């Protein structure tokens, strides 16, 4: 007896190919989203590191309402002050109380 073996092509089923294509599309979308947010994060980080004092720069102890943070225009021994600096005690005594 002759036995006829028909060999079938061994390929990937269509379902596997479709799932692989969908997976690649999702991966590309995720990489694009990650790239967008990393660029946005870098720009905002640059803005923070280049911040300038929005108020007055005064010596430490001369301000009633300081602005907290790191500003590029505030050197050692100085702070960023939101409001006007408080009066010096020597200026107050020179004008005298009630005058």
Image (tube, rainbow, N blue to C red):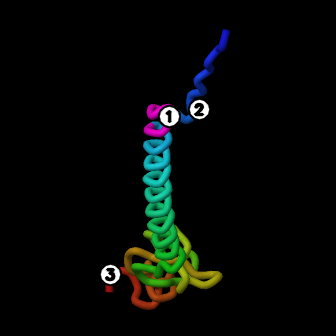
> Residue 30 location in percent, x, y?
47, 51
In the structure shown, which secondary structural element does the residue marked by tag 2 occupy?
loop
> Residue 24 location in percent, x, y?
49, 48
Q: CA distance from mark 2 to mark 3?
A: 103 Å
Q: Residue at x 47, y 73 (%)?
A: 43
Disc 1 designates what residue? Answer: 16
First-in-chain label (2 vs 3): 2
In the structure shown, which secondary structural element does the residue marked by tag 1 occupy?
helix
Which range is magenta? Answer: 13-18
Magenta region's main secondary structure? helix
Quarter placement of the C terminus: bottom left
Judged from this view, the residue extending furthest toward the right is 1
Judged from this view, the residue extending furthest toward the top is 1
**Pointer 2 local density, CA inside 10 Å: few below 14, some 14–19, many at least 20:** few
Instruction: Tell me the number on the disc at residue 10.
Output: 2
Q: Quadrant of residue 96?
A: bottom left
Q: CA distance from mark 1 to mark 3?
A: 91 Å
Which of discs 2 and 3 lies nearer the camera? The answer is: 2
Q: Quadrant of residue 92?
A: bottom left
Depth check, front residue: 66 or 51: 51
Which of discs 1 and 3 lies nearer the camera? The answer is: 1
Instruction: Tell me the number on the disc at residue 98.
Output: 3
């Amino acid at each position: 007896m002759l036995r006829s073996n028909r060999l079938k092509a061994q390929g990937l089923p269509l379902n596997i190919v479709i799932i692989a294509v969908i997976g690649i599309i999702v991966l590309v979308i995720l990489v694009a989203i990650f790239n967008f947010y990393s660029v946005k994060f870098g720009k905002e980080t640059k803005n923070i590191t280049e911040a300038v004092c929005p108020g007055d720069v005064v010596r430490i102890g001369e301000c009633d309402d300081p602005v907290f943070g790191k500003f590029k225009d505030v050197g050692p021994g100085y702070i960023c002050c939101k409001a006007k600096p408080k009066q010096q005690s020597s200026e107050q005594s020179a004008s005298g109380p009630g005058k």
